[in-house]
């Protein structure tokens, strides 16, 4: 049973639930276990990237921004190896990195990351897609944070 590919997904889902409940130790335990199962039984770069992304999200919720960024960057690295350059998961990684940089006050880095996410989404999603609005809002928040109010108006 432990070598079934769905087992890792179950552990990952449990880790995400524990993260939402604020039970971060259990979240980390389950997500790391999912990652190890993926590495040992189903060495898919895409699955491993998802586990790194999920770990990054738990670290972000804990306000451990350096660890979150490291995990988001690892997810991006793996995703770039196994997905087309215009895949939404790559855009998601850029958005996640941008969010970390934004809360750390690195507005230039956040802006660059959000722009990369926007460029990818612009090629793969309709202009009215909710994800486009979120990304445009993220870019505007960065510009406002830099005091560039006029540029923040679409």
Image: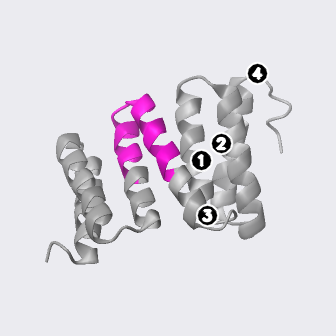
CA gap, disc 1 to disc 4? Answer: 21 Å
Q: Earlier in the sequence, mark 2 or mark 1?
A: 1
- Is residue 14 left or right of 44 when viewed as pictured? left
Q: Which mark is residue 16?
A: none
Where disc 1 sits, the SS reads: helix
| On-image quarter of the N terminus | bottom left
Q: Which residue is mark 4?
A: 147
Name, please, the residue furthest toward the left: 1
Residue at horizontal 19 percent and vertical 43 percent from the top: 23
**In which image quadrant can residue 30 be found?**
bottom left
Residue 144 location in percent, x, y? 72, 28
CA gap, disc 2 to disc 1? Answer: 8 Å
Pointers 1 and 4 in contact (C-beta within 8 Å): no
Pointers 2 and 3 in contact (C-beta within 8 Å): no
Pointers 3 and 1 in contact (C-beta within 8 Å): no
Where disc 3 sits, the SS reads: helix
Q: Which residue is mark 1?
A: 95
The secondary structure that dominates the magenta segment is helix
Q: Earlier in the sequence, mark 3 or mark 1?
A: 3
**In which image quadrant can residue 126 be found?**
bottom right
Graded by Cα atoms within 10 Å as few (under 14), some (14 to 19) or many (20 or more), the crowding at tag 3 reads some
Nearer to us: label 2 or label 3: 3
Where disc 4 sits, the SS reads: loop
Instruction: Give the vertical position of 102 relative to 78 (above or below).
Output: above
Graded by Cα atoms within 10 Å as few (under 14), some (14 to 19) or many (20 or more), the crowding at tag 2 reads many
Residue at horizontal 34 percent and vertical 44 percent from the top: 58
Whether residue 17 is visible here, answered yes or no, is no
Q: Earlier in the sequence, mark 2 or mark 3?
A: 3
Graded by Cα atoms within 10 Å as few (under 14), some (14 to 19) or many (20 or more), the crowding at tag 1 reads many
Pointers 2 and 1 in contact (C-beta within 8 Å): yes
Residue 2 location in percent, x, y? 15, 72
């Amino acid at each position: 049973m432990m070598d079934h590919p769905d087992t890792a997904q179950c552990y990952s889902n449990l880790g995400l639930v524990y993260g939402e409940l604020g039970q971060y130790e259990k979240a980390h335990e389950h997500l790391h276990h999912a990652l190890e199962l993926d590495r040992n039984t189903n060495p898919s770069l895409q699955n491993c990237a998802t586990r790194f992304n999920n770990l990054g999200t738990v670290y972000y919720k804990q306000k451990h921004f350096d660890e979150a960024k490291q995990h988001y960057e690892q997810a991006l690295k793996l995703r770039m190896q196994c997905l087309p350059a215009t895949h939404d998961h790559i855009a998601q990684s850029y958005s996640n990195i941008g969010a970390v940089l934004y809360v750390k006050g690195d507005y230039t880095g956040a802006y660059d990351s959000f722009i990369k996410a926007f460029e990818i989404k612009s090629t793969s999603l309709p202009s009215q897609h909710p994800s486009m609005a979120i990304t445009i809002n993220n870019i505007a928040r960065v510009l406002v944070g830099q005091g560039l109010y006029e540029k923040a108006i679409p």
